[in-house]
Image (cartoon, rainbow, N blue to C red):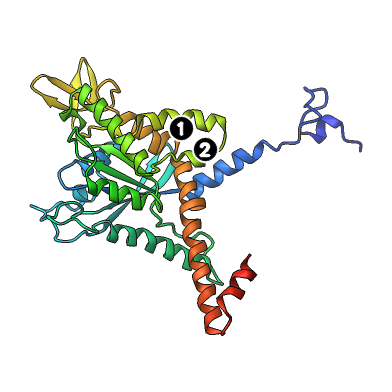
Amino acid sequence: MATSVGGLYGEKAGGPMLDFSYVGIDAILEQMRRKAMKQGFELNIMVVGQSGLGKSTLMNTLFKSKVSRKSVLATAQEKIPKTVEIKSISHDIEEKGVRMKLTVIDTPGFGDQINNENCWQPIMKFINDQYEAYLQEEININRKKRIPDSRVHCCIYFIPPTGHCLRPLDVEFMRRLSKVVNIVPVIAKADTLTLEERDFFKKKIREELRANGIDVYPQKEFDEDAEDRMINEKIREMIPFAVVGSDQEYQVNGRRLLGRKTKWGTIEVENIAHCEFAYLRDLLIRTHMQNIKDITSSIHYEMYRVRRLNENNTMVAHANGIPEHHLTAHEM
C-alpha cells in the first residue's frame, strides 16, 4: 500500500504540508535542555573578606535562603581563627524544576590578624587543590561518567567601605588570585557611604585595579564577540558593585521587599536606586553563570592542567635520563 507524502512526515493526507527543506537541527536545543534538567547544575562560590563585612548575609540574600555556613552551623559566638581557614557547605536548590548543587566556601580569619602577610596563600592552595582533584579524576583510566566538580567558579571579594582606596592586602590578594579564579569585587555595606563617596570610591578602585594589572571578571581578553564586548563593557564600568545585603522582609507601600530599616527609611536591597545588589545577582546567576563556569574550565583549570602535565613530563624525562632541552624540543 502506498504511503502519502503527508503520512511520511506525520501529517494526515490532505493536511498542512510541512516545509520540505526542514531538517530539524534546532531540536538539539531541546535535547540539551532535557539532559541539563536531568543532570542538574553545580555552582561553587567562594567569599573572601575580613569579618563583619556581611559575607554570610549577602550569600543568603543572593539565593533568598539560608545558604551561608554561619546560617546553617550557627554557634553562640564564633571566635576569629588565628590563621585563615577554609570551610564549605553545600545545598541542593530547586527552582521551577531546575536543580542546582550550590557550594559556598567561606574563609574565616582572612584579613583579621595584626600581620596579614601571605594570608592569601591558604586560599590559593585550596583553589589549586580542587583543580588537582579534578585533574586526578580526569586522568584515571576508568574515570567517572560525570566528574564531581569542586573547582571554585567564582570568588566574591569584599572590600571594606573606607571610601578612600584599596589596602595593600586587597591589591595583593586580587593580583595573585585573579590569575587562578574569577574574582568579582564588591564594596561591602555600601549604605555607609554617600552616593558621592560611593562613586569616587568605585572610580578609585577601578584605577588601582588597572594600575596593578588586576583583571577581574568579566575579563576583557575573554570577550567572544562584539555583542559580548558591549554587554561586558557596561559591567566593567560598574565594577566594583556597591552592595547591601539583608534577609529581613519589610512591607513598604503594600509591597514585600528585602531591606534594611533605618530611622530615615528603608534601604531596598533589590532597588537599583539604593544599591547595586541586583546587578551583582544578575551577573552571578541570571546572565553570566554559565560563562563563569566555562572560563573556570577552559581558562583557569586548563592553565593548571597544562602546567601540571608539563611538570610530570619533565619528571619522567629526568627519571629516564633524557636531557631537558631534548624534551623541550620534542614538546615544540
The image quadrant that residue 187 belongs to is: top left
Q: Is residue 284 left or right of residue 140?
A: left
Q: Residue at x 50, y 41 (%)?
A: 221
Q: Is residue 299 above or below residue 238?
A: below
Whole-percent x, y for residue 172 in the image: 29, 50
Neighbor class of circle 2 (other Cα within 10 Å; few <14, some 14-19, many 20+) is: some
The alpha-carbon separation of the residues under discs 1 and 2 comes to 8 Å
Residue at mark 2: 223
Placement of the N terminus among the 4 image quadrants: top right
Q: Is residue 144 left or right of residue 9?
A: left
Q: Residue at x 26, y 25 (%)?
A: 199
Residue at mark 1: 232
Amino acid type shown at disc 2: Asp
Q: Nearer the viewer, residue 292 or 238?
A: 238
Q: Residue at x 38, y 53 (%)?
A: 152
Whole-percent x, y for residue 267 in the image: 19, 24
Q: Residue furthest top?
A: 253
Q: Nearer the viewer, residue 78 or 132?
A: 132
Amino acid type shown at disc 1: Asn
| Callouts 1 and 2 close, C-beta under 8 Å | yes
The image quadrant that residue 253 belongs to is: top left
Whole-percent x, y for residue 111 in the image: 19, 51
Find numbered disc 1 in the image and state the secondary structure of the residue it sits on: helix
